[in-house]
Amino acid sequence: MPPRSTDGEGWNDLFHPEDQARARDVWAHSLKTGEPYEIEYRLRRADGVYRWTLGRATPIRNEAGEIVRWVGTCTDIDELKRMEQGKDLLSQELSHRIKNIFAVVSALIALSARQHPGARAFAVAVRDRIAALARAHEFVRPHSEVSQPTVGDTTLHTFLDALFRPYSDDGGQPRVLIQGEDAVFDDQAATSVALLFHELATNAAKYGALSVARGQVRLETRARDDRFILTWREVGGPVLSGPPARQGFGSSLATLSVEGQLGGRLERRWLPMGLVVEADLPATALSRRRAALKSV
Amino acid sequence: MTARILIIEDEALVAMELRFVLEDLGHEVVGTVADARSARALAAATDIDLALVDIHLSDGATGIEVGRELAQDLGVSVLFMTANPGMVRNGVAGTIGVLCKPTDERAVQTAVDYALGRRQGRPVEYAPPELQLFA
């Protein structure tokens, strides 16, 4: 690097054209605020090759606290950056294959059931559950810009909106209305959340509020102290006379998801106006990894 | 209405299941192909009303381009079916929309009815909820 080529405006020309505007902004911000400067950019080496570089600078102040100069370093992180990009590519590829496997498994079940007409209802139920798991995976898998879900942020509410979309009315309006505090959730919680609400919605569509045209479900989510509480309330459905005589596997699956997997409590109340289900979870259950990081 | 439908899908099991579902609905499946070249060859030789197109085929992510060609050059109605709908988040000119896999018989049926309805200029009320329409 020729002497003085790192001074002032000339320095910025050594950055990759795509990084120049960003680098200028970040540097201007540090000059204005006195905050330490840190940025990753592609820097042109003497041989003309661009290398990913970590640029850092910190201000030196005089006794009056005024900045008199900046001392900075440039670290070549090209190898690291390449490894990171390789890792991202690999995890996206794996994730894509996993998603594809859900489709293959689902097709396999449907094809197998064709040989056994009596197994049809069974096959439909299993495929619906697999579809719910696949949706959950879509939300929490590692994403690139192109693979980002098309529905917006990966929060609990956007996920549930997507999960309940098949239950919309003929006009495309949702019949499960979600309100309250939203939350982030991770891959460990996604499977359980997907199975729980898949079972509740399927059940409502067969026997509850979603089995009649005007019925609806109000789903309220709220954080209270160290708990996160989800309340499922069916309205406008058939009048209930009490708990069902017999509980199916779907019901056990819902309980298992909440109490076994998420470490919460699941309570059902068969009120005459409709079923009310409350899932009371530890606040950390939806995002255990994040909670673990915080507590370190 | 009975339609002539082409399945472009590289997972043989998924393609076979889809064929059975469409045939149960009374449609004629004119072929199932696993790559872009076979899709082009078959489309050039046969009349097709509707193509169900996966994006990742056995020769790479070629489904998007094939779908666009079928729709724009040959006037075929095109529905994408993929596990990764983000690949076509900005839409593909001339095509109808995308169904997210795994899917089920009801979703396939309503999406196909919707696509054929639009093709015939029948008034179509609402798209099925699982189908993401392109603007």
Image: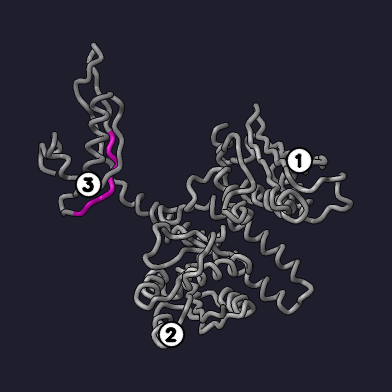
The Cα atoms of the two marked residues, 3 and 1, are separated by: 60 Å
User: How many discs appear?
Assistant: 3
Which amino acid type is shown beneath numbered disc 3?
Leu
Residue A51 lies in the magenta-colored region: yes
Chain at numbered mark 2:
B
x and y, in percent, of residue A77 in the image: 31, 47
Q: What is the chief secondary structure element of the magenta stretch?
A: strand
Which numbered tag is attached to residue B42? 2
Residue A211 lies in the magenta-colored region: no
Range of magenta residues = A49-56
Which numbered tag is attached to residue A43? 3
Which amino acid type is shown beneath numbered disc 2?
Leu
Chain at numbered mark 1:
A
Camera sees residue A264:
no
Give the mark nearest the N terminus, 3 or 1. 3
Q: Residues within 10 Å of mark 2 (few under 14, many from 20)?
A: some
Which numbered tag is attached to residue A276? 1
Disc 2 secondary structure class: helix
